Image: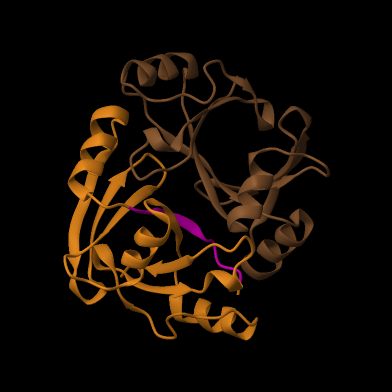
Chain colours: A brown, B orange
Amino acid sequence: MLQNYIVDHIGIAVSNLDKSIERYYDDLGFVLHSRETLSHLEVEVAFLALPNTKLELIMPTPGSSNPIVKFLSEQGEGLHHICYEVTDIRAELASLKSKGYRLIDEEPRPGANGSIIAFIHPTSVSGHVLTELCEYP
Amino acid sequence: MLQNYIVDHIGIAVSNLDKSIERYYDDLGFVLHSRETLSHLEVEVAFLALPNTKLELIMPTPGSSNPIVKFLSEQGEGLHHICYEVTDIRAELASLKSKGYRLIDEEPRPGANGSIIAFIHPTSVSGHVLTELCEYP
């Protein structure tokens, strides 16, 4: 199963979403593509549109205790993950699992912008990169 | 100065370049785009071509004492930087400097694939992202 992996976005953990959106727009001209709260993941996310991919700014929702809170408290803001768009996420997860990859999500769950998503554990991925797959309807 | 920033590549620090290239190819189908040693930066880099951008795998050359060595010893392999392609790197650096950004490279220096590059200090960039600019001839 060798699908074309497209970089859907690069995830960046931030502590102040409004301020980051403003800074990226004012200083670098990056335009807001979409913004939403993913309640089940306890995060608020904003996507900045670049010509060939997107940045995803991720902030924990108030009172949450998810991995982004841990990430921010342990190492502060910073590069968090790469998300690849694939055409058949379930087939890709099965393929990776058969190759010994450790899946954080065995089954896809709802993501941003109407996608379904699944995370692969960074210890499985060369270069120790937290890796997300997404599929759009 | 609001140029179109294109994500040229996502930089990932690795400890074994051959193994990482092999893993990304065998498991995910990512094809090697180019590979070279940048002696003045004391790194060997490999670019993997994706449909819309590239991954850059970065490994210190033997005996080097550059920031990648420090990065690997402090936090291990992982996401390292984002590089944006711009059309006029000197103009962009001047613009960022005027906005208070801390430049690691005041003047561009030779980078991979015939580019000229300059790094911006992560403390200046929202989300604390080590940011590289590159310009191709």
Residue B34 appears in the picture as rendered: yes
Q: What residue do we see at 46% from left, 32% from top?
A: A121
In the rendered view, tell whether residue B120 sits above or below residue A96: below
Dividing the picture into quadrants, the one containing residue B83 is bottom left
**Looking at this rendering, what residue extends furthest in the right direction?**
A62
- Quadrant (top left/top right/bottom left/bottom right) for the N terminus of chain A: top left
A17 or B90: nearer the viewer: A17
In the rendered view, tell whether residue B4 sits above or below residue A40: below
Asked whether B5 falls inside the magenta stretch, the response is yes
The residue stretch that appears in magenta: B2-13
The reply, left or right, for residue A43 in relation to residue B92 is right
Residue A47 appears in the picture as rendered: no
Dividing the picture into quadrants, the one containing residue A125 is top left
Q: Main secondary structure of the magenta part?
A: strand
B35 or A49: nearer the viewer: B35
Q: How many marks?
A: 0
A80 or A83: nearer the viewer: A80
> Residue B42 location in percent, x, y?
23, 71
> Residue A20 location in percent, x, y?
71, 60
> Residue B32 location in percent, x, y?
22, 44
Asked whether A63 falls inside the magenta stretch, the response is no
